[in-house]
Image (cartoon, helix red, strand yellow):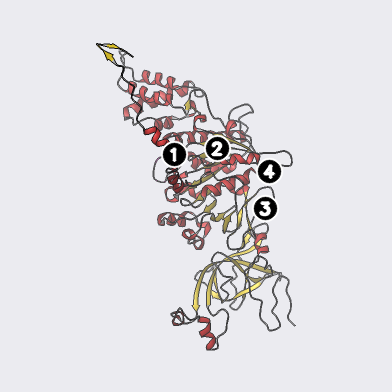
Amino acid sequence: MTKKTVGMPQPSENGRYPKAVFSSDEEAPAVIGTVKGPGETPNQYVFITSNTQAVRVGDFVYYEVRDLQSQTLQILGKISQVQLLDHIPDRIFADTEIDPSTIVALVGFTHPNPEIYAVTVEVIGYFHRAMGFINPRRPPDPGAKVFLASNRLLKSILNKRDETAIGGAHLGSLLLRDEGAVPVVLDVKEMVSTHLAILAGTGSGKSYTAGGLIEELMLPKNRAAVLIFDPHGEYHTLAEMQSHPKFLGEDGYRPKVKVLSPQEIKIRVSSLNFFDILTLLPETTDRQKSFLEKAFRKVTQFNPVRWTIQDLIDAVNEADSKEDGSQGSSAPALEWKLEQIDRSPYFSNVEHLAPKDLFEPGQVTILQMHEISQEEQQVIAAAILRQANYARINTHKGKIQPGDENYLPYPVFILLEEAHRFAPAHEPSRCKQVLRTILSEGRKFGLGVGLITQRPGKLDSDILSQCMSQFLMRIVNPSDQENLRHSVEAAGRDLLQELPALSKGQVIVSGVCVNTPVLCKVRQRYTQHGGETLDILGLWQNHFQAHRQRDRLAQSAPLKPRPQPQVVEGLSID
C-alpha cells in the first residue's frame, strides 16, 4: 500500500502521477516533470517535461523535501529557461500539406506531446510566515517530482498583505495565470517608506500604473497623504475619486484631490538658497557670483526667515559700491537679472506653498508644471522637497509646534514624474542632493518618494539604487536595459530578459513590497487615465469637415471694400 502524505499528489493505480493542466480551476497539486539534476549555478536545477502547456518562463513550480521534524516543505522556484531537447525530425515539418501527427502515427508513435524539454528553475525557497522565503540549500534529488504551484498556494505566499486588508494595494493579477486568479497585492508600508521606482519606455503604461497605485493609497483602507509633481498635466483625472463610490468609507470618508495649476504654484523667495537663486539667473560671471554670494549671506544673516528680492538687490548694490560712493559695473547687471525672478509668476516675496498646504491624510495634491520652464521646475521641486524633509524631521523630533507652517505630524509620500529631469545621471541638478538625503534618511522620519522615468539610463544611479521597490515595464532601448541589469538586481536576470517583450500594462514587480518578484497585469483603473495619446488621425480628418472648411473660408475671405464717395468739383454728392 502506498503511504499517503498530506498535501502531496498520489499516484494512480498504474503508478503514474496526474498530469498538470493549466487552469485557474485546477488547485490540486499536479506533477509537470521530473528532476534531471543541478543547473549551471548552485541555485538552479533542471527538470524534464513534455507538458508544454504548464511550462512558461516566469511561472512558479515547486519540489518537496522533508525537514528534521519530518514536515514536508514545498521549495518554490521560478522557471527561468525552457530548452527543446528532442522532437519530431525537422524533415516532417517541411511539407506544409501534411499533418506531422499523421506521419508519426504511421510509424507507431502516438504520444500526444512528442517534444521533450529541459526546464531550468531558479530556487526561491520555502515560505515562512515570519521570515518570508528561506532557501534550504537542499537541491532536489534526480528523479524527484516537480509540481506546478496552484493558484491557492501562490495567493497565500506571494503577497505580504491581503487584498482587502489595511496596508494592501491591489495592483493587478499574476500575468501567467487566468486574469484575477492570483491577485498581486503590495505592502503599502514597505513600498512607501523605502521608496519606489517605476521604470518604463514611452507608451508602456507607466503613468497608468502610477495612477492605479495612487488610487490604492487613497482608498478608505489606506488614506495616504500624497503629493505629485506632474510635468505633463496627466494626473488631473484623479479628481474623479472624490465622487467615485469605491472611495467612500463607512465613516463618511472621501478622498480630497487638490489640483494646482501652474498659476497657483507660489514659492516664497526666502525659502530658496544661494544655488537656487543662481539656477534661476541667466549666465553670470565669476565676479557677479562673488558679489551675489556676499549679498546673499548678508541678507540671510540679517533676516533668515523673511527677505525679498529687493533686499537682495540692495545688498548687491552695497557690496559693489566703491569707497568714493560710486557704483561698480556688476551691480546693475545683477539687478537686472534679479528683477527677472521678481517678475516670475511662480516666485513671490509673500505667497508660499507650505507643507501644511500640500499634505493632509486622505488628500492627494497635484502640482501641474507643464507651463513652467525646466530650470524653474528644478528650483520649485528642490524648495518643496527640502522644506518637506525639514518639516518631517523637526516635527518628528518635537522641535516644531502646531500652528507653524512646517508642522507636519504624519508620514507623506511624494511622486515625481519624469524623474530623470530632477535627478539626471551626469548633469548638475538642484534636486539631486536633497533627493539623495531623503532617499537615504527619509524612512526614519516618514517621508517616502516615488520616481517615474522613461529613461532609467539617464536617472542618477545612486538615487535609483535607494528605491527598494521596482516596477519595470516594457523597455526596448539596449542601454537602458543594460543599466537596469546593474541597478535593479532584485528582479533577476531571467525576468529582466522579458522587458522588450512585455505588452502595455504588464509589469515586473520586485523588491520589498512583494515576497518575490512577479510578472503582473495591471488592473483597470477606477478613474480615467489623463495621459492618453492624441487621436492624430481623427484630428487630421476633422480638419476636412464641411463646417470647419466653411469657417476657414470665412476667416480668409477679403473684407468688402468701403465704397468711395462720388465727388463733383471737389464736393461729395452722397
Magenta stretch?
425-431
- Above or below 88: residue 195: above
Disc number lying in front (1 or 4): 1
Q: Secondary structure at mark 1?
A: helix
Crowding at dot 1, Cα within 10 Å, few <14 / some 14-19 / many 20+, comes out as: few
**Which of the numbered marks, if any, corresponds to residue 245?**
4
Tell me the residue that label 3 is attached to.
Answer: 163
Q: Secondary structure at mark 4?
A: helix
Image x and y of residue 554, in percent: 40, 33
Q: Considering the numbered disc 3 on the image, is that residue within a helix, a strand or a loop? A: loop
**Mark 3 neighbour class, 10 Å CA radius: few under 14, some 14 to 19, many 20 or more:** some
Check the image and name the residue furthest to the left. Answer: 569
In primary-sequence order, the first of circles 4 and 3 is: 3
The disc, 1 or 2, on the residue closer to the chain's N-terminal end is 2
The numbered mark at residue 548 is 1
Q: Most extreme residue toward the right, as rendered?
A: 1
Q: Is residue 570 magenta?
A: no
Q: Position of residue 574 (x, y in %)?
A: 34, 14
Q: CA distance from mark 4 to mark 3?
A: 18 Å
Can you give x and y, in whole percent of width and height, for residue 111 in the image?
A: 57, 82
| Residue in the foreground of this view, choosing between 226 and 370 | 370
The residue closer to the viewer here, 337 or 56, is 56
Name the residue type under label 2.
Ile
Query: The disc labelled 4 sits on which kind of residue?
Result: Pro
